[in-house]
Image: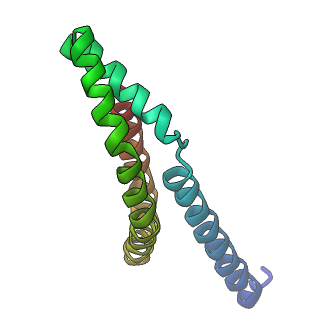
Amino acid sequence: MMTPIAWKPVTLAVVIAFLLGAGFGTARVHQQFFCIPKYTAEQKKEKLLSRFIAELRLNTEQTSRVKKILDAKTEKMEALRAEIRPRFKAIRMEMQQEIVAVLAPDQRVRFYTMEREWEASKQQWRSS
């Protein structure tokens, strides 16, 4: 004769596994999308200037003038980014959590895959 299954421990184990999965999944999404390498304003400016020089084939005078423009505006742009970034991240995380809550487990896996693909394409765009 077979032993009956004790459903309470099985149910508890499934719930704990689900909660751990959701917690680790949320942590992974946060790490994947919000722990992007940070460049200093100076590094961003130099990277942009180099790209302009290479792709626009700037001459020496143009390079000098463009550099002065970048120097003058970089600080203002960084201040604006610093002001907006925390609000943007909070809204984005809230949106992701709400979407994940609506999805079935298999859909969550696909959602996280889609998010990673999007992040990879964004990183590729940033590095070009």
Picture quarter with the N terminus: bottom right
User: Which color scheme did the rendering employ for the protein?
Assistant: rainbow
Q: Is residue 60 above or below residue 11?
A: above
**Residue 43 spot, x, y in % from top left:** 49, 32
Instruction: Give the farthest residue toward the bottom.
Output: 8
Q: Is residue 2 left or right of residue 77?
A: right
Choose between 13 and 92: the one closer to the eye: 92
Residue 31's x, y, as percent? 58, 54
- Residue at the spot 41% in from the left edge and 48% down from the top edge: 75
17 or 79: which is nearer to us?
79
Can residue 39 be seen in this snapshot? Answer: yes
In this picture, residue 64 sits left or right of residue 21: left
Q: Residue at x 37, y 34 (%)?
A: 126
Q: Is residue 105 above or below residue 116?
A: below
- Along the line of sight, the residue nearer the viewer: 103 or 119: 119
**Residue placed at 62% from the left, 70% from the top?**
23
Percent position (x, y) of residue 35? 56, 51
Nearer to the camera, 53 or 107: 53
Judge whether residue 127 can be spotted in this image: no
Of the 4 image quadrants, the one containing the C terminus is: top left
Q: Quadrant of residue 19?
A: bottom right
Coordinates of residue 121 in the picture (x, y in percent): 35, 37
Vertically, is 14 above or below 110?
Answer: below
